[in-house]
Image (tube, rainbow, N blue to C red):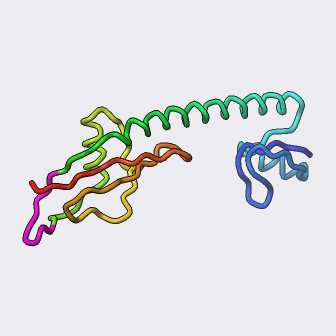
Amino acid sequence: MKIILKQDVDKLGSAGDIVEVKDGFARNYLVPTGQAIMATKANLKSFEEERKMEKVRQEKGKKEAQELADKLSRVSITTAVQVGEENKVFGSVTSQEIANQLRDQGYDIDKRKILIEDPIKALGVYDVPVKLHTDVEATVKVWVVRE
């Protein structure tokens, strides 16, 4: 029986593949769990339409993310922190603090999209990457200054 996979299935194929499986596997497992649909002419046509629409949505999302990345690359954030002897920072600058400051400037960025590899624990200027889309990444300048 030919089926169209709606999502990736281990040892069978990835989403969008048309594969041949045994009738019982398709009827009793793949189709009821929503992992596949029967490969009829109507389903093939509708699946292709869905695929085209998804591609358009992805391209639109990428374009919007690129526009936002261009704006964010010109943004600079200043964070005032308490410091002790020898300019040691108490605590660190977190992605949540950066997200809050971006929100104050009018950019609604989720803190999980802000990629801080090592904690910011010293005064200075840092380039912090922000993952906006699978293919688009922006860089925000973060100035860490004495309070």
How far from the left and from the top, in percent, is residue 97?
25, 49
| Residue displayed at 15% across by 55% down | 145
- Please report the bounds of the magenta region as a residue range: 80-88
> Which of 17/124 is in front?
124
> Which of 46/70 is in front?
70
Quadrant assignment, res 11: bottom right
How far from the left and from the top, in percent, is residue 65?
49, 37
Numbered disc total: 0
> Which of 101/46 is in front?
101
Decide: is 64 above or below 73.
Answer: above
| Residue displayed at 75% across by 51% down | 14
Decide: is 64 above or below 23.
Answer: above
How far from the left and from the top, in percent, is residue 7?
70, 47
Decide: is 79 above or below 117.
Answer: above
| Residue displayed at 29% across by 40% down | 102
Quadrant assignment, res 6: top right
Q: Name the side, left or right, on which 48 lies relative to 84.
A: right
